[in-house]
Image (tube, coloured by chain):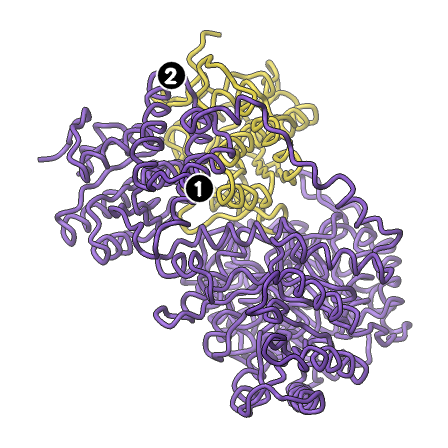
Chain colours: A purple, B yellow
Amino acid sequence: MKNFLDLISDKIVVFDGAMGSMLQQMRVDTGTLPEKLVLTSPEVFAGIHRAYAAAGADVISTATFGANAAKAGELSDGIISAAVKLARDSAPSKLIALDLGPTGQMLEPLGTMTFDQAYDVYRRAVVAGKDSDLVLIETMSDLAELRAALLAVRENSSLPVVASMTFFDNMRTFTGCDVTSFVLTAAPLADAIGVNCSLGPDQLLPIVEKIASLTSKPIIVQPNAGLPDEEGNYSVGAEEFAAYCSKYVDLGVAIIGGCCGTTPEHIKLLRKIADRGVRRQSSAKPVSAICSARRAVMFDAVRVIGERINPTGKKAMKEALRSGDYDYVSRQAIEQEEAGADVLDVNAGLPDIDEKAALVHMVTLLQRVTDLPLQIDCTKPDAIEAALRAYHGKAIVNSVSGDDDSLDGILPVAAKYGAAIVALCVDKNGVPETVEDRLRIARKIISAAKKYGIPEQDIFVDCLTLTVGAQQEQAVRTLEAIRRIKSEYEVRTVLGVSNISFGLPERKAINTAFLSAALWAGLDAPILNPNIPENMQAVAAFKALCGEDVNCAAYTAKYSAAPKAEASPSDENQADLAYLIRKGLPTAQAKAAAMLDGGIAPLELVNLHLIPALNSVGDDYEKGTLFLPQLIAAADAAKLCFDEIKKRMPESSVKGDTIVLATVEGDVHDIGKNIVKTVLANYGYDVVDLGKNVRCETVAEEVKRRGAKLCGLSALMTTTVPNMQRTIELLRRDCPDCSIMVGGAVLTEDYARKIGADYYCKDAAADVRIAAHIFKGEPLDLPRLRG
Amino acid sequence: MIVDRRELLRYLGWRGQDIDTGTQKAIDEACDLCLAAARPAHTAVLFDYDGDSLVGTGFSPGGADIRRHLSGCAKVIVLAVTIGADIDRTTERLFSSSSRKAVIFDSAASCLVESFADDVCDELQRKYGPLTSRFSCGYGDFPLAAQRDICSLLRADTRIGLCVDAGGSLVPRKSITALLGVKGDGKPFPFSQADKCALCANANCAARNREPR
């Protein structure tokens, strides 16, 4: 039997064509899951396999595209093992590819399927299909799902694996994955990568060109025969199809085959192309780049790594991590992105929290709100692995030191997931004093990394910044080490700069001067606070001076119109806080800050200004004088004022009364819940938001753990109301002291009573009145539905 | 494909209140953002219908209401439309910065997907003649569980990136699936002009259009 990896190393290999179109031609009644026919009418697929084998395909794909457990349920294993045997028996001289398509469900963060659930679906399929010769993962849209499938193959079999996604004319998949991010993420995990389905063969050309420019891995292309009309007809005939495919061979593509709408006629012509053609070897140059699932960052120019998501020395971030207020983390991410960061460093190192769990949580959360690639800032191999598993792109691991423990622990993990690394020039003897000692450690890490297959382009050397006030001679040595390492290797360099000025006055001046010098020495990726304008100015100025910013265009665009602060209308300056909140103006924050600085006590500000303002807005909303966006805008403005208060309160003293909120299991509509959360938080309650689609058991566990006296549940769909009832039952059993309020589009007061809730909330204002009743004993004009 | 401002205001609970400039600006921005983030895609397949199931698929749209809706139609179009995952992502992101904009954006996206579906249906109607209105899972007694079968029939996951999660919800969220009967003759359905509320049985819905038409 031929070996697939040998075959693709220097030959042009032909895969088979479509299954669905053949079924349609044969007018077979397929039901909603054609793969079930493997069990009931195997002769149908046997005929198709034989036809493609006769047409000259080297590889026959099993009839298992939609047979995974997420789509076929309990039938899955049986279909898959039977389909592999069927393909083998029908085409005994060919290689058999276990064909795996998408689960049909969207993974987190867009959908509700977890990475582990998706992994398990593919693990089962790989085990059931173990008698195949290779695995073909195809027609994928979501990089998260593709990674789950790839890891499932890698960790549960030794078969070669081909990974193929489906792209559209904007060069992205449906979930927004771009070609570069696909290549950077999938190439380290797969033996061949490429594109299938998508558009017709002509429109795939720029996508294939892009893939070929980025990787030396063998490339697969299996286009559709055009796009189908409503009656399932495809427009591209065999001759035309083949003409396009020969262009792909010219680009160096290793594997050609067909997707929707192709037939044995198409494959027959591909066989001729493969027999005539010569396999061109890849001319791709290795690139230094990382990515999220949707954005790649190439280190062919200076890139800024934002340092703010790190609790070290940052009170608010510490508080956020301890309390689980990940909204704060999200805001930090967005702020840094808007300030111009290219990459975000993520650190969860606090002695009293579970670093691994927090890191995974943050990585998951940040992928919801930002497309910037992440740098995982951690030195514990198990936490790094968990974070890399949860990250649907190519991250940088910050960092590996020159110690053997660090090298042996972290490098295999980084290599497995295809991550880049920061090589920290430090070992058990501490920070080296000399340039030569720094280089010695860097060389050791680079050489160890190469043994694991990590190329120089994926190594970011950190030559370390020391405090110039304490060790003055070291500043120059850091710069010299950068210069030397860059001249020796194709590596990139990172450097945290702000440490340089520790203990000195006017730190910004020292920081920016050192930053500029480091950039001139060859620093590629400064790690800094992008919210400090001087930092970003120094980077922008460098780019203008070194010629990277051609014609100083970016610099001019950014700074020519810059510093004129927008003049506020005079009534905003004069207005009192209540007015600013009522109008939803962000200037409320500055006003609150000024009042606090002027001596008003934080609690006084809350009780005499914020709460009355919010109450008045709430009343007007009730009366119908204001409508929803105005209510929310007022809540947003008040939230900014609360942020000012929090800044001035000692750690952990802002704990209020706890309210747990959740959108119930099975329900992903959380707009109403989010409104309630914002409003309640602004009234000073400690709101724990469990999110959407929360398991019934989880709600009860969290309420119990936190001893919350009030729990709010939301459901938008009739189908999920039973889960609300089940959650209430669990809460009654485990947390008898907790009151339960419910709301959501489908609920009515009667319905709320029927499922055992205490209160029905027709809007967010009702929630506030209920909370005030429960925690402050204020009278309530809403009926208690129970007892 | 447009964001119908009147429809948007209705979703936002507007009952004639003064719209201040800040709110107006937020509405304008959210609408622009929504149009920019939308990646409309649709897929439709025409099936023969024997009064019970879609011929050749083994799929029988369950419930008396859908049967009544499709009665007399020999062919049925199964349709799925979405305005894409970027809409969901943008909503999520907006909630971290401005809840007001997030809420408006979310409502605008609901208007947009309806409008896109109307455009697609108008196009289908030009091609196949008069159609019934759209009938979706969850209307009347047509069970939500059918969502999965509809998406499988259409291969909506690979064709337009539309998934069904374990609870039966569509992801991306701003998506619609529906069945439409091909009537053969009679009046075309005025997709872009129809009063959606008049077609819906949920008389207690908070967003119901209560103005007389």
Q: Point out residue B143 in the picture as x, y percentages from the top left corner.
A: 39, 37
The one nearer the camera, A171 or A493, is A493
Q: Residue at x 46, y 64 (%)?
A: A311
Count of marks overlaid on the render: 2
The chain containing the residue under callout 2 comes to A
Q: Amino acid at mark 1?
A: Ala
Q: Would you name the residue on which mark 2 appears?
A: A624
Q: Point out residue A618 in the picture as x, y percentages from the top left corner.
A: 34, 25
> At numbered mark 2, what does the secondary structure look like: helix, strand or loop?
loop
The chain containing the residue under callout 1 comes to B
Q: How far is the residue under mark 1 from the one under mark 2? A: 39 Å
Q: Are marks 1 and 2 in contact (CB under 8 Å)?
A: no
Q: Residue at x 82, y 80 (%)?
A: A10
Residue A419 sits in which quadrant?
bottom right
Q: Point out residue B60 in the picture as x, y percentages from the top left corner.
A: 45, 39
Residue A603 sits in which quadrant?
top left
Q: Would you name the residue on which mark 1 appears?
A: B146
Say above or below: A442 vs A780. Answer: below
Q: Residues within 10 Å of mark 1 (few under 14, many from 20)?
A: some
